[in-house]
Amino acid sequence: MTYTDKSQNADAHTPSAFAIPAYIREILDRFDRAGYEAWCVGGCVRDALRGTSPHDWDLCTNALPEQTLALFSDKPCLTVGIRHGTVTVMWEKQPVEITTYRCEGAYIGHRTPSSVTFTPSLREDCLRRDFTVNAMAYHPSRGLSDFFGGADDLRARLLRCVGDARERFDEDALRMMRALRFSSVLDFDIEPETAAAIHAYAPLLNEISGERISSEFRRMLTGVRAAQLLCTYADVIAVFYPPLAGCSGQLRVLNDAFAICHTAETRLAAAFRLCGCTNADDVRMILHFLPLDRAFSDAVTALVRDAALPPPVTRTDMRHALSRTAYGYLPEQLQLHAALFPDDRDACDASLTLYRAVTESGDTVKLSQLAVNGRDLAACGFHGPAIGKTLHQLLCAVMDDRVANTADALLTYAKTLSTQRSDDSGE
Ligand code: ATP
Ligand code: MG
């Protein structure tokens, strides 16, 4: 293996080679044959060295974007990122991002480089990358190129900025959230200077787009270190979710809760409740400050609202619970309840078993499952709001096993309801 700079110190713990998919080798070979230099770079090198399989393979090259396009003129290429040096080659329907070595000008708004300049230097390209473990390049015959000690940090499970951490976060504040996300997902420590810079520069998060923060934050929440990070970086998270400042000092309870709650939705709902935020309207308002997709914030809000509801015990209770909540979400509610109310854990387990039984046997829990609909009721003389009200009464009767879910039984029962209503109104 060929090493450069600090990488020459890399010891035998670093695998000397790792498997690269055949199509990536073919692309690298094509660059080599044409006299260019190209490398696998970034997350794929990090993940392959960790022994996990990368979800995509990014390449970098000294070829200019137009030269890359010419080299792959026999393949469909996407050029949306070409101004930043990226050409996406569609190799047998597999998109591969190939980016010309580049360096970045001064940053605007703590997020965007004012200019991008192409460079013939791999080192310069790696210098602009965020963390040492993300700044390594690999080629099957030239080996690992590791200018900043990424392999050592990978072995030590450390996340360290390339260069001065404060400068790097001042340039691009999103990197702070990326640090928290990688630390949580990879189970890496954040190196002390990088950590100190995150605490110091956290207010800069106010200046960058909520979408970008929330996407990193959600990934952070599902990582193995989520509880530890919420606790240690409560001051940072509080920049966008102020009540979560209360996570500080709550490591044990957060850890216990997250051992049961695994999704981003349930973990965030648990964190809010553990910080004393139990009012769903407050939570909706807080979530509003950081754009999350609608389904996510609806789920978190509903989970916070319903977290204290007792777990359904009987089949009938379960049907009613399912008719009130969306399908698929009740198990998360039960997980959250178990996490927050340890005395109810056995009851939650039993309720989860009941949930599976009820959903697997397809019990009626929704209006659309009824054997009659509004048109059937209208044909029997119902009209106006009475139709909706009667349908709900029919659903309740079916869920309570008082009436069979057949058209005859339901229409007969509906007529008794309408008679009762006429009697009650004195008609
Ligand atoms: P994953 O794809 O698993 O999220 P990744 O490391 O591939 O991890 P990407 O966001 O796909 O992350 O970015 C690819 C590479 O680009 C990174 O490994 C890093 O070298 C560089 N990079 C991405 N975002 C930044 C940034 N904000 N600042 C500096 N370098 C970055
Ligand atoms: Mg990636």
Image (tube, rainbow, N blue to C red):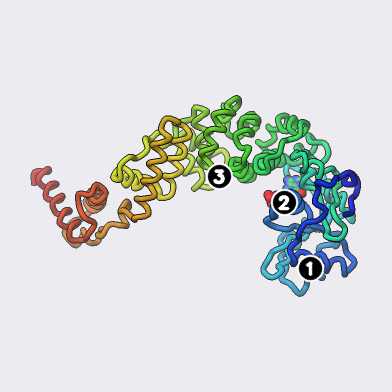
Secondary structure under tag 3 reads: loop
Q: Residues within 10 Å of mark 1 (few under 14, many from 20)?
A: few
Q: Is residue 412 left or right of residue 221?
A: left
The type of residue carrying mark 2 is Gly
Label 2 with label 3: CB-CB less than 8 Å:
no
Earlier along the polypeptide chain: callout 2 or callout 3?
2
| Mark 1 to mark 3 CA distance (whole Å) | 40 Å
User: Residue 152 in the image: x percent, y percent?
Assistant: 82, 42
Q: Nearer the viewer, mark 2 or mark 1?
A: 2
Q: Is residue 67 left or right of residue 110?
A: right
Nearest to the observer: residue 129 or residue 189: 189
Give above or below for 69 relative to 7: below
Give above or below for 27 relative to 160: below
Q: Is residue 408 visible?
A: yes
For image coordinates 68% across by 66% down, the residue present is 94
**Quarter of the image holding residue 374?**
bottom left
Secondary structure under tag 1 reads: helix
Q: Is residue 302 visible?
A: no
The type of residue carrying mark 1 is Glu
For image coordinates 62% across by 42% down, the residue present is 223
Nearest to the observer: residue 288 or residue 91: 91
Q: Where is mark 1, residue-wise? A: 26
Using the image, tell me which numbered label, if any, was put on residue 292.
3
Judged from this view, the residue extending furthest toward the bottom is 74
User: Residue 179 in the image: x percent, y percent?
Assistant: 70, 40
Label 1 with label 3: CB-CB less than 8 Å:
no
Q: Nearer the viewer, mark 2 or mark 3?
A: 2
Q: Is residue 286 left or right of residue 220?
A: left
User: Residue 306 in the image: x percent, y percent?
Assistant: 41, 37
Earlier along the polypeptide chain: callout 2 or callout 1?
1
